[in-house]
């Protein structure tokens, strides 16, 4: 099959005007101008007309469990109050509710051009019953705050659930809800099982206060549910994670909003750097401290974007995340921002050799959007796009319908 479009944004060189992509089965075999590709490749031609063809978008951090919570939790100045509220909402949900929520989330993410996703689920036992319509890196989210003596058991059960999927990962929730033993054991087991790892880290000022002095709203809340604060010694969350985990390229560190000078010094010293994931609209929802994008990039970190969950966001559109990122970092080019949901996120999720670019031997995960304004640069037009995508291909197959 050959797919022709007005412009192809490959993320592997300059955009191609009047371009085409040839594919065999699920793999791309040729990319170039339409005349060039047509001359080299026989077969059916699908002409998308005045469209921009680009790689499918990749969401580096999402909680589809909570799709059903859209609009149900009012904004609060307190991150701890939000935790209380989401716990109350979750208490009323059944396994069937979570199953429906995850499936609805997949449909919405796909509608907005997402063809691969990192999904954290607090219920990994449901994974075997779910058929993901897009490529999914499943992360089993683990918490042992009430039962730290069960850390090993919790990790082992998560691993058993992940053996049913092609792309697995372990997700100790956060240093305030997961013990050092859980982190250490998860780090060890993930390498044996060829899993990736992710965690929420240094997300809020309340988390930082708890680690520095054991108090504040978050510290008081966790003390009330039985968390033993004896492990706190004045170290920051980042210092603690780096002291008992080998945070390298197998890790995705999500948020990193609250970093001290000592944290930056430690991060600078990492030889094989973990990936960093930022969720711009969720960040804005909570009113967190400024995300230190420039500092992290100067230290050599690759930064990807995610939507987080609909308990702190309005939809699962990565186009909207790109616009929010561009708004917060206006010096960034639209091409750089698009790279955060294609090339960077493909690297973060272990798909660097198959996704995030349109190039030979990569998987044919493609999306198209209308080419409305020829006076704009193509990258800015992509970032400005606000609607569901008009055409999608997943592993060489046209996905239809994409708006169901």
Image (cartoon, rainbow, N blue to C red):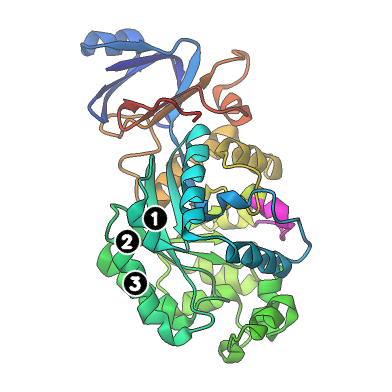
Label 1 SS: strand
The dot on residue 60 is none
First to last magenta residue range:
282-291
Counting from the top left corner in percent of width and height, residue 255 is at 59, 59
Return the x and y of residue 54 as percentages of the image width and height. 45, 27
Q: Which residue is mark 1?
A: 138
Vertical comparison of 330 with 20: above or below: below
In primary-sequence order, the first of circles 2 and 3 is 3
Specify the quadrant of the image occupied by residue 115. Answer: top left
Q: Under tag 3, what secondary structure?
A: helix
Q: Which residue is mark 3?
A: 157
Q: 69 or 57: which is nearer to us?
A: 69
**Disc sitting over residue 162 in the figure:** 2
Residue 150 appears anywhere in the view: yes
Residue at 61 percent of width and 88 percent of height: 229
Crowding at label 1, few (<14), some or many (≥20) Cα neighbours within 10 Å? many
């Amino acid at each position: 099959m050959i797919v022709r479009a007005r412009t192809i944004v490959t993320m592997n060189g300059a955009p191609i005007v009047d371009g085409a992509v040839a594919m065999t089965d699920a793999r791309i075999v040729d990319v170039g101008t339409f005349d060039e590709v047509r001359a080299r490749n026989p077969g059916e031609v699908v002409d998308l007309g005045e469209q921009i063809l680009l790689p499918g978008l990749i969401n580096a951090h999402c909680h589809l469990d909570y799709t059903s919570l859209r609009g149900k939790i009012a904004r609060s100045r307190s991150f701890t109050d939000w935790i209380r509220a989401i716990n109350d909402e979750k208490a009323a949900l059944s396994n069937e509710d979570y199953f429906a929520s995850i499936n609805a989330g997949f449909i919405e993410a796909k509608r907005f051009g997402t063809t691969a996703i990192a999904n954290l689920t607090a219920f990994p036992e449901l994974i075997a019953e779910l058929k993901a319509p897009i490529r999914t890196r499943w992360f089993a989210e683990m918490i042992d705050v009430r039962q730290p003596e069960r850390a090993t058991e919790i990790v082992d059960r998560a691993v058993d659930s992940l053996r049913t999927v092609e792309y697995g990962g372990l997700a100790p929730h956060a240093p305030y809800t997961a013990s050092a033993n859980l982190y250490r054991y998860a780090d060890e087991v993930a390498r044996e099982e060829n899993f990736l790892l992710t965690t929420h880290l240094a997300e809020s000022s309340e988390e930082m206060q708890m680690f520095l002095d054991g108090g504040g709203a978050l510290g008081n809340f966790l003390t009330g549910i039985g968390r033993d604060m004896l492990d706190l010694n004045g170290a920051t969350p980042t210092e603690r994670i780096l002291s008992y985990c080998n945070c390298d390229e197998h890790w995705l560190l999500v948020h990193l909003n609250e970093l001290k000078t000592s944290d930056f010094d430690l991060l600078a010293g990492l030889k094989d750097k973990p990936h960093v994931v930022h969720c711009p609209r969720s960040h804005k929802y909570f009113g967190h401290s400024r995300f230190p994008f420039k500092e992290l990039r100067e230290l050599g970190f690759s930064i990807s974007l995610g939507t987080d969950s609909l308990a702190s966001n309005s939809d699962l559109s990565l186009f909207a995340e790109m616009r929010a990122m561009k708004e917060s970092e206006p010096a960034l080019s639209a091409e750089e921002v698009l790279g955060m949901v294609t090339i960077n996120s493909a690297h973060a999720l272990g798909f660097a050799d198959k996704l995030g670019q349109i190039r030979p031997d990569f998987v044919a995960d493609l999306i198209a959007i209308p080419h409305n304004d020829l006076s704009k640069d193509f990258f800015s037009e992509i970032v400005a796009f606000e609607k569901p995508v008009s055409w999608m291909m997943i592993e060489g197959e046209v996905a239809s319908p994409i708006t169901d």
